[in-house]
Image: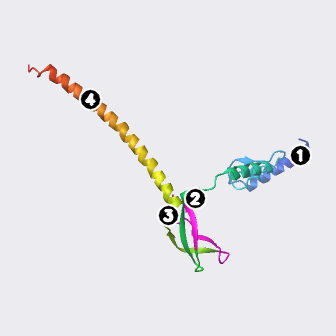
Amino acid sequence: MTAQEREAHQAAEADFQHRHAECHAMRWSVAGSRTTHCGFCCPPPPLSEKQIEAILSIFASADHPNPAELDTWRLTLTCGHVTDKTQHSSNTYWSASTTHCSTCGQTRGIVTSEKLPPSPARHAAEHRHLAMKLDEARREHERHQKKADAARRRIDKLEAQSTALGPVAES
């Protein structure tokens, strides 16, 4: 650095220390710039076009939710309109307090939510899931039954050996 650059850098460093005296966080900077930023209160640098494209390709390749795994909920909104929305079946209650009303075109509060009976696709998916769990439980039972049968054979063998030896002589 030249003397002028060093002086400018030291002034910027002093300014950083003054502005971030209480942060005690890591620092970050952008390549090619001597300006440093605080990891606590300064926003991160913007994403590059290449990073944005990579993120978009990840989201674009993501699977859409399987309709068989979605439940339909009937929502009554503060505007008085009723709308049906879906969310994943793992939710036991409607998880938002507001939603977009397609009739009003506004975001409205949710007054009541009611889970509707499952669709035929959802019902079939539940049957497949339960059948898979049942098969798994049967395999586990069979595995335990084999161990129990082996233990019973060992007990029978040991009892037969004990009987063959006769009664224990008292001394």
**Rounded to the nearest whole Å, what is the CA distance between mark 1 and mark 4?**
88 Å
* Image position of 34 (left or right of 3): left
**Rounded to the nearest whole Å, what is the CA distance between mark 4 and mark 3?**
49 Å
Verify whether residue 100 appears in magenta. Answer: yes
What amino acid type is highlighted by mark number 4? Arg
Give whichever of discs 3 and 1 has the lower sequence position. 1
Q: Label 1 crowding class (10 Å Cα cut-off): few <14, some 14-19, many 20+? A: few
- Secondary element at image label 1: helix
**Rounded to the nearest whole Å, what is the CA distance between mark 3 and mark 2?**
11 Å
* Image position of 29 (left or right of 79): right
Give whichever of discs 3 and 2 has the lower sequence position. 2
Q: How is the image coloured?
A: rainbow
Q: Is residue 20 above or below residue 115?
A: above
Label 3–label 1 contact, CB within 8 A: no
State the residue position of label 2. 67
Q: Nearer the viewer, residue 29 or 66?
A: 66
Q: Identify the residue at image location x=50%, y=70%.
A: 114
What amino acid type is highlighted by mark number 3? Pro
Give whichever of discs 4 and 2 has the lower sequence position. 2
Label at residue 5: 1
Q: Identify the residue at image location x=90%, y=43%.
A: 3
State the residue position of label 3. 118
- Can you tell which of label 1 and label 2 is closer to the viewer? 2
Verify whether residue 70 appears in magenta. Answer: no
What amino acid type is highlighted by mark number 2? Pro
- Secondary element at image label 2: helix
Label at residue 153: 4
Which contiguous range is marked in magenta? 83-106
What amino acid type is highlighted by mark number 1? Glu
Q: Is the C terminus in the top left, top right, bottom left or bottom right quadrant?
A: top left
Give whichever of discs 1 and 4 has the lower sequence position. 1
